[in-house]
Amino acid sequence: MTTGVKADPGRRRRVLGGAVCGLVAACAGLAVAELASAAVRPEASPVTAVGGAVVDRTPVGVKEWAIREFGTADKLLLALGIVLALAAVAALAGVLAVRHLPAGIALAGCFGLVGAAAALSRPGATWHDALPSLGGGLAAAGVLYVLVSVLTRPRPVGAPPGGAWSLDRRGFGRLVGAALVASAGIGYAGRRLGAYGSAGATASRADLVLPEPAVPAPPVPPGAQLPVPGISPFITPNGDFYRVDTALVVPRVDADTWRLRIHGEGVSNPLELGFRELLARPLVEHDITLCCVSNEVGGPYAGNARWLGVRLADLLREAGVRPPSRGGPADQLVARSVDGMTIGTPVETVMDGRDALLAVGMNGEPLPFAHGFPVRMVVPGLYGYVSACKWLTELRLTTFAAYDAYWVRRSWAQQGPVKTQSRIDTPRPSAEPAEGRVAVAGVAWAQHRGIARVEVRVDAGPWQEARLGAADGNDTWREWVWEWEATAGPHTLEVRATDGTGAVQTGVRTGTVPDGATGWHSVPVRVRPGPGRKA
Ligand SMILES: Nc1nc2c(c(=O)[nH]1)N[C@H]1C(S)=C(S)[C@@H](COP(=O)(O)O)O[C@H]1N2
Ligand SMILES: [Mo]
């Protein structure tokens, strides 16, 4: 034959066939790893473990960008990215294996090792956590070996091109199909086993009946919720409450086996208690607005809920803790969650009389798993990253000088008091309301200081005072509305709030890092001319 290299049909077949072998082997490996991680623990799954390692090592700028651009979908996108990267390497391993079987198989196996290393590096990992990745790597290597061996089996001498080859191809196709079906079955079994593994936690939440609070919160004042279409609901329903955390799988903690340890510097009476013991204490109910330091001006990461919990200061006092102002040696309370997150809060703030809570209830139901079941912290007036540890399991007293918590090691400030913010909920940016009366409305927050005034201005004109909704204490946001006589054309609306101390929200624009964004929320709108008017 005189065909050149370009026309070599065998080459295309080897490359394509090899890629298919690699991808199928990766599916098998992932399925086996998922099944094994369901048996070990969900965090040991290679995709989750590698994802968690990536999250922890992602520079703060990239993380802020991802939160801004993708919001809560950032986790899904990360998992997708990892799977795509895995697919690319798998295809490469397959092509390599067709040329040189041991090299391809070694590459597949290496991937298992990477997963195992990531899993071992995760908080709370034991050597068991390496097993899913190692098992998956072995399975992938095995499937790759079989598939590539069949694909590259030499054609018997003298066999006519076509006949025997196509038979071989059919056999190969069948093998690929069988491997995919088996992978799907194993993956499905892993899912079922995973649900079974968290059944105890699910039941412990479903069966939980929250005790009545010893100190109930007064009803939300009727005027707190303004009747303006498009404004945030005064109480954020649990299902709509924003979620910010590093957990790629939501920890499902069994309340019946949950323990909390309180120990560290200046703790004369270390405590350890279970969930029932916590619930046996007097519970208080309190409305608190929680917000995230990563919230951009005008952003969505704030929510208001009615929390039920134990006053943290009482527990600390019982443990013998004194705040620094009373001579206590520890100025930092480090909360640790089951997923290894650490969050450092000033002891002074927690013990200054505000309703800092170990919360068990949110809007009348047990905490949702995504919001920290069975127990989380909530401290009015502090950003979540320095106060609101979810899936809490340990409270350690130390100093800010001696210890930096998770976010502080990643460019965020040690101290994170909430900055006064106000947000225009309606009209939405680029809305086109009709000329005439337009309700401009939203929420403003300055937790623990309260909101005293909200003002709106149009096109940098004079500030106009908005009408405030009724205040529900100082720890929640406050709704506001301003009736605007809108004239046709493009306009810019801006809002600013004044807190309970009389301090006016600064107009200086800063980013979220290191201790929260500042600046006035500004919304561009284009007002449509009314009927019978010219544009
Ligand atoms: N265990 C754990 N707790 C956590 C976090 C986390 O990543 N892990 N994120 C904190 C941050 S930054 C915020 S703003 C709040 C958000 O709480 P939510 O998800 O219930 O709204 O949780 C805090 N508690
Ligand atoms: Mo946050």
Image (tube, rainbow, N blue to C red):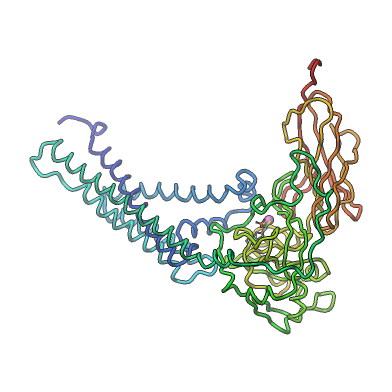
Question: Does 52 sit left or right of 148 as displayed?
Answer: right
Give the mark count.
Answer: 0
Given residues 159 and 98, the one toward you in this image is 159
Given residues 518 and 449, the one toward you in this image is 449
Question: Does 305 sit left or right of 104 as displayed?
Answer: right
**How far across and how far down the image is residue 177, in percent?**
29, 47
**How far across and how far down the image is residue 455, in percent?**
87, 42
Question: Does 88 sit left or right of 269 as displayed?
Answer: left
Name of the residue lying farthest toward the bottom = 268
* Residue at x-position 50% and y-position 51%: 79
Query: Residue 400 sits in which quadrant?
Result: bottom right
**How far across and how far down the image is residue 526, in percent?**
76, 27
Up the image or down, 29 lies above or below 122; here it is: above
Quadrant (top left/top right/bottom left/bottom right) for the C terminus: top right
Quadrant (top left/top right/bottom left/bottom right) for the N terminus: top left
For ligand 2, give the image quadrant. Answer: bottom right
Question: Does 172 sit left or right of 155 as displayed?
Answer: right
Up the image or down, 85 lies above or below 32; here it is: above
Query: Residue 286 sits in which quadrant?
Result: bottom right
**How far across and how far down the image is residue 71, in percent?**
62, 47
Given residues 383 and 473, the one toward you in this image is 473
* Residue at x-position 71% and y-position 68%: 358
